[in-house]
Image (tube, grey):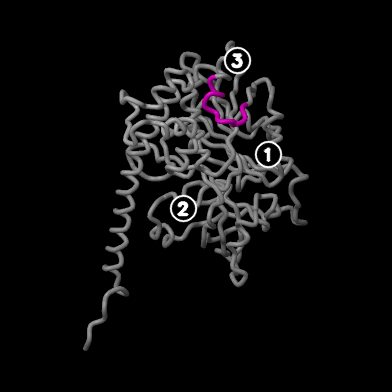
């Protein structure tokens, strides 16, 4: 069954139909509701929880116990935010009120609940801001192709951001049907995976997909991420059991594909799980904290503690434990290069992040001093 208002495909067993055959109903639990969100509700508020399944310009397609809804975000909320990351995104839970008494499907978004998890990256381009790709996700399927698209360093970047998100990463190596050196590529990924599950599949031949389906239990939300042409939409279509998303061919010269997915969308699976499809990402710039970096490179950090000098730059200094680990074969050169690259990137990120915070605080002070309510009243 297809409900055009939200672009969400469901089977008869997943929904309860009203007698008038006009709307669909779901339970909050089937949409991924958890105690984390329940405890944010005020029993005295007359607000309805709903989950964002898709956004089209200024309209939010929502799913709730009352069926599919169309949500509008008030202008005041847009004015109050310091970053676009604070706006509702796919996967978010929002609280809504009716917008039109004559049309119960039209609602106003009054509040976005705190997120249990979020996959973020730096917004593409020069602007320094956070982009939340998917919210309230339990796991991330990091998809890469085993053709010319294969890039272990890119997988490593996705892993860093996934660990920072609070979700469980699962690495999916697609297109085994086009790969003649699978063992070598698997070994390369295992070097940087840090114990993350790795699955080699062929979405085209419907091979190995059962392993992925087993992760998406009822009420569990998985996001599928990767660059264009890696087969994300084909994988989701196979998991759904029918062709919901468009798929496109990749160029044989460089294995790059077109953006067949142009928006993010939350879909409900037949078993009660949920999956989010996302457009391919050309840039995957870091938006993470120091703790995530330390956890990601704990193997490298372990050597650093044994350097002779506390300010060791790990280049040519005598007594450098990292250089000794390289010589002894205990540390791969590529691993150290990744570590040094990420450290430099984190240093630049922290400097720009601090500057952003100072700028935002300055704007808040300006707003306060300009506000008529903040000015002392003149004595008569």
Task: Reply above or below: 36 against 14.
Answer: below
For label 2, the residue is 87
How far is disc 2 from disc 3 in space, using C-alphas? 43 Å
Q: Residue at x 31, y 44 (%)?
A: 351
Identify the element where label 2 is drawn. loop
For label 1, the residue is 216
Of residue 293 and residue 226, the one placed in the foreground of this image is: 293
> Mark 3 Cα within 10 Å, few/some/many (few <14, many 20+)?
few
Q: Position of residue 98 (x, y in %)?
A: 58, 64
Q: Position of residue 44 (x, y in %)?
A: 60, 72
Q: Residue at x 63, y 33 (%)?
A: 236
For label 3, the residue is 183
Magenta-drawn segment: 188-198
Answer with mark 2 or mark 3, whichever residue precedes in sequence: 2
Quarter-of-image position of residue 49 = bottom right
Whether the residues at callouts 3 and 1 have beta carbons within 8 Å, the answer is no
Q: Position of residue 222 (x, y in %)?
A: 61, 40
Q: Nearer the viewer, mark 2 or mark 3?
A: 3
Residue most extreme to the bottom = 380
Of residue 325 and residue 131, the one placed in the foreground of this image is: 325
Task: Reply above or below: 272 against 358.
Answer: above
> Mark 1 Cα within 10 Å, few/some/many (few <14, many 20+)?
many
Q: Is residue 194 magenta?
A: yes
Whether the residues at callouts 2 and 3 have beta carbons within 8 Å, the answer is no
Identify the element where label 1 is drawn. loop
């Amino acid at each position: 069954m297809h409900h055009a208002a939200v672009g969400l495909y469901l089977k008869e067993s997943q929904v309860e139909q009203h007698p008038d055959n006009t709307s669909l109903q779901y339970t909050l639990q089937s949409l991924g509701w958890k105690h984390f969100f329940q405890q944010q509700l005020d029993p005295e508020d007359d607000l309805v929880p709903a989950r964002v399944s898709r956004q089209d310009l200024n309209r939010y397609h929502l799913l709730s116990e009352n069926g599919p809804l169309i949500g509008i975000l008030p202008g005041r909320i847009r004015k109050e935010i310091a970053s676009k990351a604070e706006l509702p995104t796919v996967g978010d839970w929002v609280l809504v009120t009716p917008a039109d008494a004559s049309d119960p499907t039209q609602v106003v978004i009054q509040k976005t609940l705190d997120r249990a998890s979020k996959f973020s990256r730096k917004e593409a381009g020069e602007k320094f801001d956070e982009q939340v790709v998917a919210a309230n996700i339990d796991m991330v399927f990091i998809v890469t192709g085993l053709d010319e698209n294969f890039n272990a360093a890119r997988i490593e970047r996705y892993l860093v951001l996934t660990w920072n998100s609070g979700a469980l990463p699962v690495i999916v190596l697609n297109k085994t049907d086009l790969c003649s050196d699978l063992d070598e590529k698997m070994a390369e990924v295992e070097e940087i995976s840090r114990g993350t599950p790795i699955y080699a599949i062929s979405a085209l031949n419907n091979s190995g997909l059962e392993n992925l389906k087993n992760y998406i239990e009822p009420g569990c939300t998985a996001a599928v991420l990767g660059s264009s042409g890696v087969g994300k939409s084909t994988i989701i279509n196979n998991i759904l059991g029918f062709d919901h998303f468009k798929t496109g061919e990749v160029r044989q010269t460089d294995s790059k594909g077109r953006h067949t997915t142009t928006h993010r969308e939350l879909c409900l699976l037949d078993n009660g799980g949920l999956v989010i499809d996302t457009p391919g990402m050309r840039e995957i710039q870091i938006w993470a904290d120091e703790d995530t970096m330390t956890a990601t490179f704990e193997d490298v950090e372990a050597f650093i503690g044994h350097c002779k000098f506390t300010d060791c730059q790990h280049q040519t200094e005598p007594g450098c434990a990292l250089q000794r680990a390289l010589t002894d074969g205990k540390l791969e050169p590529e691993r150290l290069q990744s570590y040094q690259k990420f450290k430099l990137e984190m240093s630049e990120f922290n400097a720009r992040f601090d500057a952003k915070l100072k700028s935002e605080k300055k704007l808040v002070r300006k707003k306060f001093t300009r506000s008529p309510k903040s000015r002392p009243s003149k004595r008569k």
